Image: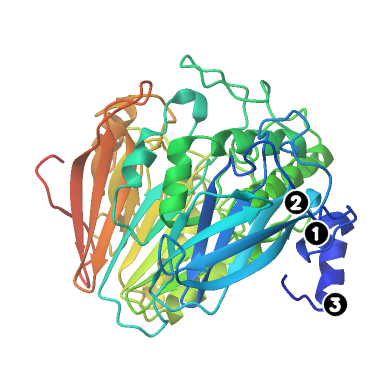
Amino acid sequence: MPNLHRRAFLGLTGAAGAGVAAAIAGFSAAPAWADPSFADNPFTLGVASGDPLPDGVVLWTRLAPDPLAVDGLGGMPRRVVPVTWQVAEDERFRRVVRAGVERATPELGHSVHVEVGRLRPDREYYYRFRVGNQLSPVGRTRTAPAYGADRRRLSFGFVSCQNLPAGYFTAYRHLAEEDLDLVLHLGDYIYEGPAAGTIGRAHLPAAEIFSLTDYRIRHAQYKTDADLQLAHARFPWAVTWDDHEVENNYADGTSEDAAQSPEDFLRRRAAAYQAYYEHMPLRRISIPHGRDMRLYRRLRYGNLAEFNILDGRQYRSDQVPTGSDDPSRTMLGNAQEKWLLDGLSASRARWNVLGNQTVIAEADRDPGPGKTLSDDNWSGYPAARQRLFDGVVERGVRNMVVVTGDAHCSMVADLKQNFDDQSSRTVGVEFLGTSITSGGDGADMDGRGTEWLASNPHMRFYNAKRGYVRCQLDHRQWRTDYRVVPFVTEQGAPVSTRASFVVESGRPGVQVDTAEA
C-alpha cells in the first residue's frame, strides 16, 4: 500500500472528495472482504501496464466478474478486496522479483493501480494478479532505460479513435504481434454517444452517457474486447485523452451542448475523468481531483527519445470561428505550455516527441486563395501554435516529431514556422495516425485528402484506411510505417504497410521511403 503523508492526504480530500481520496490512499469506508471467492472470472477486463520508468512501471486491472452490470459496479460487492500481484523475469513466474498486495476499493470501481519500483532498467518483465482462488491473465511489460543510458534503438506504436460500433479492433491484434517497447494512445479511447452501428457492437448503455455509472459501463464494454486486451497485455502503454472520453468537442469547462449548464457539465467531466483513471494504467500523479486531472507528463528513453504526453482538452480556450489571432487563446493552458517549452529546451535526447491529440499542421481545405480550417484543432488556435513553434526555434530544439490522432486518417507534414511562407524554417515533422475503427472501413483517398493535398504544400501524404503507426528510431534516423487494414466492418482483416517515411537526425523535414506513398 502506498504511503501518503497526512497533509497530502488532506489535500486530496479537499480536492477530490473524501471517498475517492481515501480510496486512493488505500482506505475505504466499506468493510473488508478478507476471503473473497468468485463464481465467475473477476478479470474479465484483462490486465495492462503503463508509464514505464527505469526502475518501475504501473500495473493495472479492475475486478469485474459481471463487467456490464447496470449499476456500474462490475458485479462486485461494496467491499474492499485484497488483490495480490507478482512481477517475474519469466512467463512461468519461477523467478519472481517483486510481489505485494493492493486493496481494490468500491470508491474506485475495484480498479487496481500498482506502482512497482526497484526493477532493473530496460528489462522485460511479466506480471499477474490473484484474488481469492482466481488468477489473472499474464501481462508482459518493459522498463525504460536508465536516464543517462545510450539506448541505440527504440520501437513504439501509436493509435487513437476506437469507436466500438464502427468496427472490429483487428488492428490491435496485429499491433500485438509487433516488437515494440511502448504504445501511445492519443485519445478517443471510448465514444460517449448512443451509436449502435450495423455489425452487432452497439454501445452500452444504449444512450449518451453522463454519470459515473454510465462511464464505467462504457469503459468496461470497450475493455471486454479481446483484441484490445491482447495489445494491452503485450506492451506498456502511455495514454492521453481527447474529447470523446467526455463529450465531443468540449473545451475546458465548456460543453458543446448549450442546453447543458456549466455546473452539470463539470459534474459530467468529473465522472468521466474518474472512470478514465479507473480504467487506465496511470500513476498517482494522475489521480482525479474532482473535475481536474493531471495527465500531461514526460517519459524518457535514455539519450535517444523523450516523450511529452500532452493534454489538449482540459485547459484549452473555447472554440471560436477560425482566423482569430487573439494572443490570449490557448490550446494547452499557460502552465502546460511553459512545462512543454521548458522541457524541450532542457532535453538532451536525440528525438523530442510530442504525443498530441489534434492536427497541429495548418490543414486548409480550400484550394483557392481563401482558407477553410477546423476550429477544433491547432488551426483554430494559431497564436498558441505560433508561440510553440517560435519557442522551439528560439530555444534551439532539434529533431521535434509530433505524433497525432483524432482525424481518422493518416497524414504526414513538415511543420513550417510560417505556413504562409513555405520557404520559412521547418521546425519539426508531424505524423498523423489514422483511427482503429472510427469512420468505418475507410479508403485510400477521400474528399478531405484531395483538398488537403491540393491546399497545403507542406503535406506529403494522405490515406484514410484504418490501422496503426509503427515508429523505429536510432541516433541516425526515424522511420515511420503506416500499417493499415483493408476493412474493419468484418473480422479477420490482414495488415500491410501502406507507406513509410524517414526523418534524418539534424535534417528537418520528412523523406518518402517507399514508393507506395
Q: Nearer the viewer, mark 3 or mark 2?
A: 2
Q: Identify whether 201 is placed above or below 7.
A: above
Binning the other alpha carbons within 10 Å of mark 2 as few (below 14), some (14 to 19) or many (20 upward) gives many
Q: Which residue is mark 3?
A: 7
Of residue 506 and residue 493, the one placed in the foreground of this image is 493
Contact between labelled residues 2 and 3, with CB atoms less than 8 Å apart: no
Of residue 161 and residue 385, the one placed in the foreground of this image is 161
Q: Which residue is mark 2?
A: 108
The amino acid on which the numbered mark 1 sits, given as a three-letter code, is Ala
Contact between labelled residues 2 and 1, with CB atoms less than 8 Å apart: yes
Q: Which residue is mark 1?
A: 23
Q: At 53% from the left edge and 80% from the top edge, which residue is drawn?
A: 118
Q: At 70% from the left edge and 60% from the top edge, which residue is drawn?
A: 287
The amino acid on which the numbered mark 3 sits, given as a three-letter code, is Arg
Residue furthest to the bottom in view is 148
- First in sequence: mark 1 or mark 2? 1
